[in-house]
Image (spheres, coloured by chain):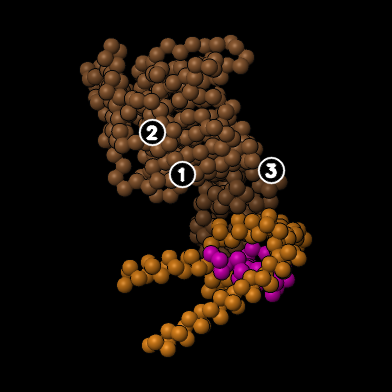
Amino acid sequence: MLVMQVTLDNWKVQVKKGYLEFCLLLLIRTHGRLYGLELLEHLNSLEMPLKEGTLYPLLNRLCDDGLLQSSWQTQNVKGHPRKFYALTKAGREALGEMESEFVRMMDIVSQLQKTNRGQA
Amino acid sequence: MNKEIIIEHYLSKLERELQALPTGDRAEILTEIRSHIFEASEKHPEREIARILDDMGTPEAVAARYLAQKGVPYKATTSAPRRWLRILAAGMAGVFVVCVASVLFAIWYFSPLLKVDEAAGRVTLLGGLIDVNEPAGEVKIGSMHVKADMSDDHDSEFSDDISLNLGGATKVSGGEDLQVRKVKTLSIPFNNAKLEVSPSKNSRFEWDCKNLTAGAPPVSVNAGVMTLDLEKVSVAKCSLRIPDGIKTEVRGVNGKIELNKPRSDFDVKVTNGKVDIDPDPSRVYDFEVKVANGVHDHFARSEAKDALKVKVDVINGVVKKE
């Protein structure tokens, strides 16, 4: 149904907002250093597609916020320098907190699901 | 070759939209985006360059996101053809405004927007929407009707003589010791109110209100200034007691303010309404009374050093001496 689809899409957008940064930081932690295109490819393969025009400003902001640090690679790049991103110490700590918070949230969700089944 | 031109055109637009950013930041952003576009195009040669640029988004949209991250307000730059359209639109809007202005002028010219009858002490504005009736001691603003009891001032609550149509009003009183709170100035903004201001017998600032909205008017203190925000409670009828020497600002729309024997400096601004001043015969005052659209009694100025400065500004209304 169209209405339900719109509502669902809205919900997904909302949830995605908080979730996205979390996933980005996790990705960067896993791979150590990544640049824009690589990040986009990983996100695509995880079926979390993100528009390029959204990703780059977001990475920029995470650098400004001190969670990420960037470095340019100018060798072997055919005249197109690549900007690599890695977690800062603050970024690693923040990510740790996000993980705890996320686990807590999943806990609550599974509790809520159990209650529902009990009443079903 | 065509591809390069399209890409450079996109990037130069992006550069323009990012003008608000520092040169270094802007250069890094452009380098990163340029690299992305070229590399994406090389990795996926079958993809149209238009699709890659589409995936990135319009230069305006991308720039807006970068600027938002930096807390810079975004102002779209316009290209020449769009600029002409804007000028044309502005011209048409101008013509429209002139037409509307002439119609309004005609209405004003022919209808009694403001009628001042000084002898009878009556001021009518906007065809009777605002009606200040001095002899009857009445101010009518829209549907709000304020009828004053012309007898001597009350020290506490209003008696039943004063009828302000407050159906389910709540009574709220409060007070603050201004010496303890280190306050030297009071600010009382209002919106639809009848305020009766008298001197306090001590250092306490007190208020006794009856207002339409439930709840107490918020009180806050900042840098020696206390604010009793009567704007937040609509249709307030209050009796206020001001400690001596505390400069008081009363500002608002729609109201009747009574200054009874003021013993402090006052700065009163009312749009639509009336201010009554009953000076204390034992004090010297430096009055500065101005009325736009209305009448006021004569109030003397004074150069004396110990004169209390009472400034009153009324738009649409009356200032009277008791």
Give the colour in which the image draws chain A.
Answer: orange
Local crowd size for mark 1, using a 10 Å CA cut-off: few (<14), some (14–19), many (≥20):
some
Q: Are marks 2 and 1 in contact (CB under 8 Å)?
A: no
- Per the image, the residue denoted by label 3 is B23
On screen, residue B222 versus residue B274, left or right, reads right
The mark that comes first in sequence, 2 or 1, is 1
Label 3 and label 2 in one chain: yes
- Looking at the rendered structure, the kind of residue marked 3 is Thr
Q: Nearer the viewer, residue B70 or B290?
A: B290
Give the colour in which the image draws chain B.
Answer: brown
Q: Secondary structure at mark 1?
A: strand
In magenta stretch: residue A108: no
- Using the image, determine if residue B265 lies above or below residue B10: above
- Disc 3/disc 2 C-alpha distance (Å): 57 Å
Q: Nearer the viewer, residue B212 or B201?
A: B201
Q: Nearer the viewer, residue B266 or B86?
A: B266
Q: Secondary structure at mark 2?
A: strand
The mark that comes first in sequence, 3 or 2, is 3
- Per the image, the residue denoted by label 1 is B173
Total numbered badges shown on the rendered structure:
3
In magenta stretch: residue A22: yes
Residue found at x 60% / y 56%: A57
What residue range appears in magenta? A17-41
Residue found at x 54% / y 15%: B284
- Disc 2/disc 1 C-alpha distance (Å): 15 Å
Q: Chain of mark 3?
A: B
Residue found at x 47% / y 39%: B207
- Looking at the rendered structure, the kind of residue marked 2 is Lys
On screen, residue A69 versus residue B278, left or right, reads right
